[in-house]
Image (cartoon, helix red, strand yellow):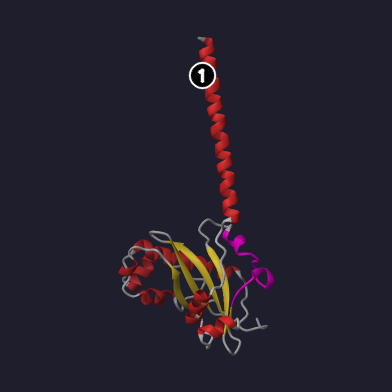
Amino acid sequence: MINRKSNTVKNTLKCVLVLGIIAVVCVALLAVANKFLQVEIMLDRATSDMINSIAPTGLDDEKAFNERYIEMVDLSKGEYAIKSIDDFNEKGSNKKVRALYKSKNSSGKITYVVESEGKGYVDAIVLLIAYDSQKNITGMAVKSQMESFWDHISDINTVYGAFIGTSASATHTSSQIAASTGVTVKKTLAGITDGVNVANEFVLALGDLPDAEGRA
């Protein structure tokens, strides 16, 4: 009888130990996956063309891309208050900035474009949001989305219009945007709003933005 109880205890301890080891291994694998399997954001031609539509260079898409009038910003090499997008994102679970770009027109004026994301009903809604050097939103576009109710937004430009012209210091709510636009797709609108608020917070954290090459 004693042997049976002893064996039961031993078997229970073994199971607990095995489960503990499995949990540790799973956590380690997730950490490795998060570090090495992240999607690397690159400035591809499609993204450049979209940026050229919301932060115009005054050039055709091909020339703007090939002659690097639109570039991805390396924060570590600029006079920015933050030096890494990862550092910014790690400060809060809802911060999801993917990249920062600069669009320069023929006279050297710079428009900054933040690629951010908000959680939609199905998956992330990825936004491109353009800012002038005074940190006002001057243009917007949705880079990607998988919303099943996307077609229920009859005029996405009306949604963009609710944000364009506002300052990065503003905080938006989906109910506020819904009231001003008449859009009723709540979860999708919440994802767009969240993406804008995250981008706003990021732009504010950058510090002063030069309005032209070599001039702050």
Circle 1 sits in a helix, a strand or a loop, which is it? helix
Question: Which image quarter holds the C terminus?
Answer: bottom right
Residue at point 61% right, 77% down?
A: 209
Q: Position of residue 212 (x, y in %)?
A: 62, 84
Q: Residue furthest top?
A: 1
Q: Position of residue 185 (x, y in %)?
A: 33, 65
Frontmost residue, 187 versus 26: 26
Q: Is residue 75 magenta?
A: yes
Tell me, yes or no, if residue 88 can be seen here.
yes
Category of crowding for the residue at label 1, using alpha-carbon neighbours closer than 10 angstroms: few (below 14), some (14–19), many (at least 20): few
Residue at point 56% right, 48% down?
A: 30
Q: Amino acid at mark 1?
A: Thr
Which image quarter: residue 41? bottom right
- Image: magenta residue range: 71-89
On screen, residue 68 above or below 121: below
Reading the image, the residue beneath label 1 is 8
In this rendering, would 111 be left or right of 80? left
